[in-house]
């Protein structure tokens, strides 16, 4: 039956981001493609930064709570994406109408690009740390070599590349721990190190730190839609669910905390690079290249895909994704040449508010859909997103109360879910599998 939420955006070609059964990936291929996210040095950094603020025990509790939250939310979102084949853009069009089909991919592309800049910069810093030279040339190398890696898309060979590189990453991280122990000795008490707590409980502060990466919920949807319905249970638990986050947050986080105790590294990503290269030398450089190539394959893929969707929606430009991969690389390089940390961290903080609001609304929408209580109009979606995002940003930038600034993500989620539920009336049953017309297999691939 017609989708009332998409009548205002009638272009039939827009539905080609819906993935039919013929365009789905095997269980192992999709798992290996997604588990590229596991390799980011950022996961070491975020645990170190949290421990520096609240201590190791509180960080571990916040980390465990985050694993549960990410596991539950992504179980729901991944299974929905698998059963419907919808992308972030198409789901946003249902929740917000035409506005959502423009703003969501633009926000997603910018966030993925920013993370690509951060992770690519780590490789450049590692290369300069070991070989010396002009950092600008290393930046250029780190963006150019990603073009052939990503240009084929997820279904082409990223799954195979990441499957091959995964054992090297695991072995390398173990080697870093062994080398650090041999060189520095065992750091007694590294699991019990504490610091003075702030106004909030330490575990809650750590939990809020991990809320800063809720963009992975959006990543999940654009990857999970490539999964087969028969594999929904496996993907919801292992590929995108609690197993993935227990390993990603837990394994990487513990290594970061161990290195913090063994080498007393600074709470920056450059500090992590120095610890890895200092422990393993050239092998550490290779480890960083391997790990960051895996994670940036996801960042560059999603940035280019959503840039393509945005350009098609906003400007009517039907340009192959390969061109957008090059555009992503160029933009990443130009951003690397600027004072990245000076403004991108603030931009990410603001975008984080928009993203947590989007995730909360998406979760309400998905739960309603599964209960066959679908909204009859998208008119309430945009106000709910704007109200909650404005409140979250206001709390983030205000200087009156540090406690409320920290609580901005929680307030944003509560306002987004509550206001969307109140402003969007419920209507009849929607068939999730037939609401969006299927496209040809060629169009179904992430072009």
Image (cartoon, helix red, strand yellow):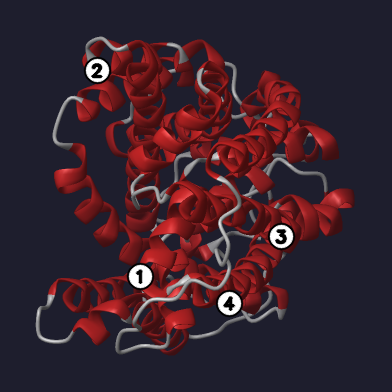
Q: Is residue 303 left or right of residue 44?
A: left
Q: Quadrant of residue 395?
A: bottom left
The reply to whether callout 4 and callout 2 are in contact (CB within 8 Å) is: no
Q: CA distance from mark 4 to mark 1?
A: 14 Å
Q: Residue furthest right?
A: 230
Q: Which is nearer the N-term, disc 4 or disc 3?
A: 4
| Mark 2 neighbour class, 10 Å CA radius: few under 14, some 14 to 19, many 20 or more | some
Q: Secondary structure at mark 3?
A: loop
425 over 89 or under it: above or below: below
Q: What residue did someone put label 1 on?
A: 53
Q: Residues within 10 Å of mark 3 (few under 14, many from 20)?
A: many
CA distance separating discs 4 and 3: 18 Å
SS category of the residue bearing label 2: helix
Q: Which residue is mark 2?
A: 135
Nearest-to-viewer mark from 2 and 3: 2
* Mark closer to the chain start, 1 or 2: 1
> Going from the N terminus, do you reach mark 4 or mark 2 first?
4
The residue at 30%/78% (across/down) is 406
Q: Image height check: is 224 above or below 49? A: above
| Nearest to N terminus: mark 2 or mark 3 | 2
In the rendered image, the vertical position of residue 76 relative to residue 227, given as above or below: below
Mark 1, residues whose alpha carbon is within 10 Å: few (<14), some, or many (≥20)?
Answer: many
Question: Where is residue 435 drawn, in percent x and y?
Answer: 65, 57
In space, the residues marked 2 and 3 are separated at their CA atoms by 38 Å
x and y, in percent, of residue 135 in the image: 24, 17
Residue labelled with disc 3: 241
């Amino acid at each position: 039956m017609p989708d009332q939420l998409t009548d205002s955006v009638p272009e039939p070609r827009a539905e080609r981001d819906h993935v039919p059964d013929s365009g789905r990936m095997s269980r192992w291929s999709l798992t290996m493609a997604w588990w590229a996210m596991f390799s980011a040095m950022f996961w070491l950094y975020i645990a170190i930064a949290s421990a520096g603020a609240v201590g190791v025990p509180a960080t571990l509790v916040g980390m465990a709570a985050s694993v549960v939250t990410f596991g539950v939310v992504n179980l729901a979102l991944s299974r929905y994406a698998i059963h419907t084949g919808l992308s972030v853009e198409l789901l946003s069009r249902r929740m917000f109408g035409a506005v959502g089909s423009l703003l969501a991919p633009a926000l997603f592309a910018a966030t993925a690009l920013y993370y690509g800049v951060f992770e690519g910069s780590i490789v450049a810093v590692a290369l300069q740390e070991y070989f010396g030279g002009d950092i600008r040339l290393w930046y250029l190398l780190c963006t150019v070599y990603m073009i052939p890696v990503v240009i084929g898309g997820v279904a082409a060979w990223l799954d195979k590349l990441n499957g091959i590189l995964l054992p090297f990453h695991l072995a390398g991280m173990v080697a870093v721990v062994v080398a650090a122990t041999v060189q520095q000795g065992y750091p007694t008490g590294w699991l019990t190190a504490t610091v003075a707590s702030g106004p909030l409980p330490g575990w809650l502060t750590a939990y809020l730190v991990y809320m800063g990466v809720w963009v992975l919920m959006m990543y999940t949807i654009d990857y999970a839609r490539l999964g087969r319905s028969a594999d929904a249970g496996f993907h919801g638990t292992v590929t995108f669910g609690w197993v993935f986050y227990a390993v990603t947050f837990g394994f990487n986080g513990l290594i970061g905390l161990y290195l913090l105790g063994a080498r007393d590294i600074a709470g920056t990503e450059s500090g992590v690079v120095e610890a890895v290269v200092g422990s393993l030398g050239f092998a550490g450089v290779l480890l960083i290249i391997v790990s960051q190539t895996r994670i940036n394959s996801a960042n560059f893929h999603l940035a280019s895909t959503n840039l393509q969707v945005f350009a098609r929606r906003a400007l009517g430009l039907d340009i192959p994704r390969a061109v957008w991969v090059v555009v992503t690389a160029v933009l990443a390089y130009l951003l690397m040449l600027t004072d990245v940390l000076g403004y991108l961290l603030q931009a990410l903080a603001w975008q984080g508010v928009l993203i947590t609001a989007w995730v909360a609304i998406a979760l309400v929408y998905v739960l309603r859909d599964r209960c066959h209580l679908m909204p009859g109009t998208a008119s309430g979606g945009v106000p709910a997103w704007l109200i909650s995002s404005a409140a979250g940003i206001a709390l983030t930038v205000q200087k009156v109360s540090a406690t409320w600034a920290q609580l901005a993500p929680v307030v944003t989620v509560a306002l987004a879910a509550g206001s969307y539920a109140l402003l969007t009336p419920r209507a009849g049953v929607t068939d999730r599998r037939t609401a969006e017309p299927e496209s040809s297999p060629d169009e179904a691939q992430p072009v």
